[in-house]
Image (cartoon, rainbow, N blue to C red):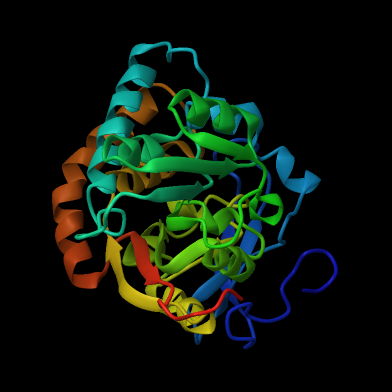
């Protein structure tokens, strides 16, 4: 990595990163920008430019992101729209957790670690199935929320995690890997924490999807500059090969929020609670059936991978 936090080459395969037409602003919190994305044409892996790190990124998270947008706060949401949005998110999360890669046939309960656990919704899902639940997150509000949900949570990152090697049967990255500065290092650390034969489940936005091209700089899942990396199914396959992980399943999935929130950015320009958000929800719900049909043909707005550490593999 060059000075200033910019990758000189693709962190997955080492090939040259090419410029794209993406020039997007932080539409969720600050309005800062524009930020761009460079792409490896071989891996179909995107890298945000500039790559903000550490203290530079703090102002793009904080209370507006954690307590406001993601509802990590203990207080009940106020207002009809906020309560409706909370119910919508909980139902959408329950449906997502019941599908691949988080629902794996034949997987017996054990110890699960959720990296970037947020409010602990995914861990609560696993706890109800009989798992011992552990989380890790750099946000104090997220750690507190996940702890209230019953998980054992570490405040920090995989760089300072407290667990011994070969501790977990399952490690999940639910829309968190794209926020991590060194994604291969994070997956390598997760691999070392897995028991032989253990699984890594990853889900994140699909950089190569048709919705990204349609909505362009107003595609909700860009989320610049918080999303430092932009994966595709091809990029997930390249990463799994580089880390000697067996890819059990790599595919795409569809979400309602991508359509609704992208339309909201088209209508309002940036996150704007009120009637414009209500309108985007209505339009998104109406548009989702035909969008899902197109997703079935061209690929969904998210992609996922279920990866296994080979049973005979040593900790690396």
> Tag count in the figure?
0
Report which quarter residue 260 is drawn in: top left
What is the quadrant of the C terminus in the image? bottom right
Residue reaching furthest to the right: 3
Relative horizontal placement of residue 101, taking residue 196 as reference (left or right)? left
Above or below for 40 versus 257? below
Residue in front for this viewpoint, 21 or 139: 139
Above or below for 259 versus 1? above
Relative horizontal placement of residue 270, taking residue 174 as reference (left or right)? right
Residue depicted at 44% across the width and 73% down the height:
309
Residue 113 horizontal/vertical position (percent): 48, 49
Above or below for 148 versus 246? above
Residue 20 horizontal/vertical position (percent): 56, 73
Residue depicted at 59% across the width and 71% down the height:
184
Residue depicted at 59% across the width and 66% down the height:
183
Q: Is residue 220 among what the camera can see?
A: no
Report which quarter residue 185 is drawn in: bottom right
What is the quadrant of the N terminus in the image? bottom right
Residue 226 horizontal/vertical position (percent): 61, 50
Q: Is residue 12 among what the camera can see?
A: yes
Residue 73 horizontal/vertical position (percent): 52, 21
Relative horizontal placement of residue 154, taking residue 290 as reference (left or right)? right
Report which quarter residue 23 is drawn in: bottom right
Residue in front for this viewpoint, 302 or 72: 72
């Amino acid at each position: 990595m060059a000075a200033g936090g910019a990758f000189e080459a693709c962190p997955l395969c080492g090939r040259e990163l090419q410029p794209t037409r993406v020039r997007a602003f932080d539409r969720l919190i600050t309005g800062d920008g524009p930020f761009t994305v460079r792409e490896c044409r071989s891996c179909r892996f995107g890298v945000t430019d500039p790559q903000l790190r550490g203290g530079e990124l703090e102002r793009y998270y904080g209370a507006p992101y954690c307590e406001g947008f993601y509802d990590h706060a203990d207080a009940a949401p106020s207002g009809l729209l906020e309560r409706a949005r909370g119910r919508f998110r909980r139902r959408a999360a329950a449906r997502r957790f019941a599908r691949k890669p988080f629902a794996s046939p034949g997987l017996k309960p054990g110890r699960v670690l959720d990296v970037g656990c947020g409010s602990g919704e995914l861990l609560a899902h696993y706890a109800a199935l009989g798992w011992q639940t552990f989380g890790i997150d750099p946000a104090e509000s997220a750690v507190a929320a996940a702890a209230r949900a019953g998980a054992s949570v570490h405040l920090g990152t995989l760089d300072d995690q407290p667990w011994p090697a070969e501790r977990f049967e399952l490690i999940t990255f639910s829309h968190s890997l794209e926020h991590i500065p060194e994604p291969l290092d994070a997956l390598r650390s997760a691999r070392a924490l897995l028991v032989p034969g253990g699984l890594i489940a990853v889900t994140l936005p699909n950089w190569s999807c048709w919705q990204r091209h349609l909505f362009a700089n107003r595609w909700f899942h860009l989320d610049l500059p918080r999303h430092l990396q932009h994966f595709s199914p091809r990029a997930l396959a390249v990463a799994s090969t580089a880390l000697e992980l067996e890819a059990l399943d790599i595919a795409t999935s569809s979400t309602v929020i991508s359509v609704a929130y992208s339309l909201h950015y088209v209508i309002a320009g940036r996150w704007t609670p009120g009637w414009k958000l209500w309108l985007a929800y209505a339009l998104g719900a109406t548009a989702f059936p035909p969008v899902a049909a197109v997703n079935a043909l061209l690929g969904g707005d998210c992609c996922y991978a279920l990866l296994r550490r080979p049973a005979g593999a040593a900790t690396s």
